[in-house]
Every structure is written in structure tokens, then in C-alpha cells.
């Protein structure tokens, strides 16, 4: 597999995650939703690359994003 096939998707998903952190830092609730979406993308990437350690952390981050998104909505 070429460099782009392995690295480019991860770079794109990383940029999406950074965008989520930026929004959260600006106290925008939308950031938590973007973070949830980015973690779903990370899960797909972890499965595609068979990176099971990454998959475990993605599941925990999904839970944290979801929890905080719900708490910020109250």
C-alpha cells in the first residue's frame, strides 16, 4: 500500500478531530458532535488498518464525547 493510502486518511481524520477541539475550546456544543463523528471515523480507520489498540481508545473517546455532548445540552 502506498503512503497516501495509509497516511492521508489518518491526516484527514486528525484534522476533523482538531476542528472538534477548536469548537469545544470556543465553547461551542457542536464541537462535541463533531468529535463524536470524528471518533466514528477513527473506529473505521482502526478497523481498516487492524490497529486494535487504537480501536479500544476510540471506544472510550466515543463515550466521553457522547457524555459531554449530553451534559452540555442541559
Image (cartoon, rainbow, N blue to C red):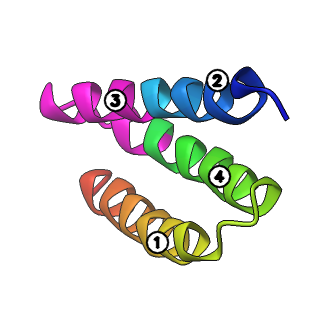
Residue 55 included in the magenta stretch of the image = no
Residue 52 is drawn in which quadrant?
bottom right
Lower sequence index among marks 2 and 3: 2
- Numbered mark located on residue 57 in the image: 1
Secondary structure, mark 3, is helix
Q: Which residue, given by chain and number where applicable, does mark 2 sit on?
A: 8
Secondary structure, mark 2, is helix
Q: Which residue, given by chain and number where applicable, does mark 3 sit on?
A: 18
Question: How many numbered marks appear?
Answer: 4
Q: Which residue, given by chain and number where applicable, does mark 4 sit on?
A: 40
Secondary structure, mark 1, is helix
Which of pointers 2 and 3 indicates the residue nearer the eye? 2
Magenta highlight range: 17-33
Q: Nearer the viewer, residue 29 or 17?
A: 17
Q: Nearer the viewer, residue 2 or 65?
A: 2
Q: Position of residue 27 (x, y in %)?
A: 16, 32
Which of pointers 1 and 4 indicates the residue nearer the eye? 1
Badge 4 crowding class, 10 Å Cα cut-off, few under 14, some 14 to 19, many 20 or more, is: some
Residue at horizontal 47 percent and vertical 42 percent from the top: 33
For marks 3 and 4, give the CA distance: 15 Å
For marks 1 and 4, give the CA distance: 12 Å
Lower sequence index among marks 3 and 4: 3
Amino acid at each position: 500500500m502506498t503512503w497516501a493510502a495509509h497516511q492521508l486518511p489518518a491526516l484527514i481524520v486528525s484534522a476533523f478531530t482538531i476542528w472538534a477541539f477548536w469548537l469545544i475550546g470556543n465553547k461551542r456544543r457542536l464541537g462535541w458532535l463533531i468529535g463524536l463523528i470524528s471518533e466514528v471515523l477513527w473506529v473505521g480507520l482502526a478497523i481498516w488498518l487492524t490497529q486494535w489498540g487504537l480501536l479500544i481508545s476510540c471506544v472510550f473517546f466515543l463515550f466521553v464525547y457522547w457524555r459531554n455532548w449530553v451534559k452540555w445540552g442541559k
